[in-house]
Image (cartoon, helix red, strand yellow):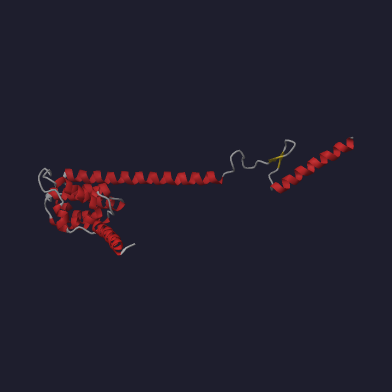
Amino acid sequence: MGFMGMLIISGIVGLGFDAVAVEKRLLTREEAVRMLPYSDEGNDPGEYEAFLKLFDYGEAAYPALVEELFDTRASMRIYNIVNVFTGSKGDKSLPLDGLMRFAERHGRDSPSFPGIEAVFRGLGQIGSEKEKEFLRQYLDLEDTLVRHTVEDSIKLIEKRLETLKREALRTERRERDSGHRQGQAAPGQRAGDGASGAFGFTLPRMPIGISMCLILAIVAAGGILFFKRR
């Protein structure tokens, strides 16, 4: 391979590594905020496409969005941040921690603080046992709408946990049944069956070599008796 060919290949490989690095790079807060919807309807040119791209970034956008969550008082922006947390792929530890800290800071101010209902709803959509217990402390909120959101979120988590438990039990049962079938005797032969002799009766279950010796002995004895009679 010539020198120019090696340079071309090196350049292609380098571009590949750069692309991977860009995909894994965390978004800055400015970049993440710029991709959030900003108009009332969210239908300005390119606005919706940029928002969808934020979902694709997923985990790479979480730190910036958590930071923005605590600094904004715009209910629609909080709503959209929660939507990214619940609708994108990635480890949910950071979003859940951010949502719980937000609820701790503003949950008792409901409904005066913007976006608190969306935060409680988000905890129900991606939360687990820890978040369920956290939400219980807000079941006494005076605001009916927000309190019902908390109740619905707890029920949603309980339903999801119950579904996961049933799936785990089904998986365990399938694995146990599969292991039981593998440990059974070969098809057509029941445990405890003996080996059939040459004269149609069944010998007790024993090693094949011993069984064959007994069969040969029976055949030989029969032959001797036959010749003696003659």
Q: Does any portion of residue 38 appear in the rendered image? A: yes
| Point 47% across, 46% down: residue | 175
Q: Position of residue 189 (x, y in %)?
A: 62, 40
Between 106 and 197, the one nearer to me in the picture: 197
| Point 29% across, 46% down: residue | 157
Q: Is residue 85 left or right of residue 2?
A: left
Q: Position of residue 30 (x, y in %)?
A: 14, 57
- Outermost residue on the front side: it is 2
Q: Is residue 159 above or below residue 8?
A: above
Q: Quadrant of residue 228?
A: top right
Q: Does any portion of residue 116 appear in the rendered image? A: no
- Outermost residue on the bottom side: it is 3
Q: Position of residue 127 (x, y in %)?
A: 28, 50
| Number of numbered discs | 0
Q: Quadrant of the N terminus?
A: bottom left
| Point 17% across, 49% down: residue | 50
Q: Is residue 64 above or below residue 219?
A: below
Q: Quadrant of the C terminus?
A: top right
Q: Position of residue 110 (x, y in %)?
A: 15, 49
Q: Is residue 163 left or right of residue 40?
A: right
